[in-house]
Image: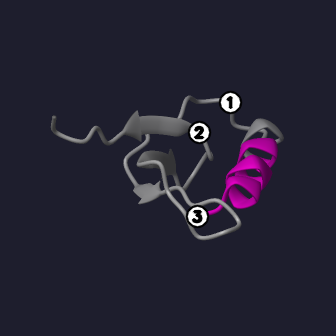
């Protein structure tokens, strides 16, 4: 999911009539427009960044 797609999802999520919080059960890796990822995961329902993958040292 790109940063722009996540932003669109956040807007749509905030416009819903039902204001229950998202449980972030479905995640997708975040990508920028150039096809690079820093390892962040985005909820595919609400668009929030909810997890980050850390590289082992």
User: Which of the two residues, 57 or 37, is positioned nearer the viewer here?
Assistant: 57
Instruction: Tell me the crowding category of disc 3: few under 14, some 14 to 19, or many 20 or more residues within 10 angstroms, Cα based.
Output: some
Examine the rendering and report whether any part of residue 39 can be seen: yes
Question: Can you tell which mark lies on residue 19?
Answer: 1
Occupied quadrant, residue 55? top left
Q: Position of residue 13 (x, y in %)?
A: 72, 43
Q: Earlier in the sequence, mark 2 or mark 3?
A: 3
Label 1 and label 3: CA atoms lie apart by 24 Å
Q: Earlier in the sequence, mark 1 or mark 3?
A: 3
* Residue at the extreme left of the image, as rendered: 57
Closer to the eye: label 2 or 1? 2
Q: How many marks?
A: 3
Q: Is residue 55 magenta?
A: no
Identify the residue shown where x is 50% and y is 57%.
Answer: 37
User: Which of the two residues, 56 or 10, is positioned nearer the viewer here?
Assistant: 56
Instruction: Tell me the crowding category of disc 2: few under 14, some 14 to 19, or many 20 or more residues within 10 angstroms, Cα based.
Output: some
Occupied quadrant, residue 46? top right
Instruction: Tell me the crowding category of disc 1: few under 14, some 14 to 19, or many 20 or more residues within 10 angstroms, Cα based.
Output: few
Q: Which is the main secondary structure of the residues drawn in magenta?
A: helix
Q: Position of residue 5 (x, y in %)?
A: 72, 60
Occupied quadrant, residue 16? top right
Would residue 46 appear left or right of 10 to someone viewing this image? left
Q: Secondary structure at mark 3?
A: loop
Question: Can you tell which mark lies on residue 1?
Answer: 3
Reading the image, the residue beneath label 2 is 48
Question: Can you tell which mark lies on residue 52?
Answer: none
Q: Secondary structure at mark 1?
A: loop
Identify the residue shown where x is 76% and y is 57%.
Answer: 4
Label 2 and label 1: CA atoms lie apart by 15 Å
Which region shows up in magenta? Answer: 1-12
Identify the residue shown where x is 58% and y is 64%.
Answer: 1
Q: Is residue 34 above or below residue 12?
A: below
């Amino acid at each position: 999911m790109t940063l722009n797609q996540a932003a669109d999802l956040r807007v749509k999520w905030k416009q819903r009539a039902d204001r229950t919080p998202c449980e972030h059960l479905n995640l997708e890796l975040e990508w920028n427009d150039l096809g690079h990822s820093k390892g962040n995961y985005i909820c595919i329902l609400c668009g929030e960044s909810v997890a980050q993958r850390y590289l082992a040292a």
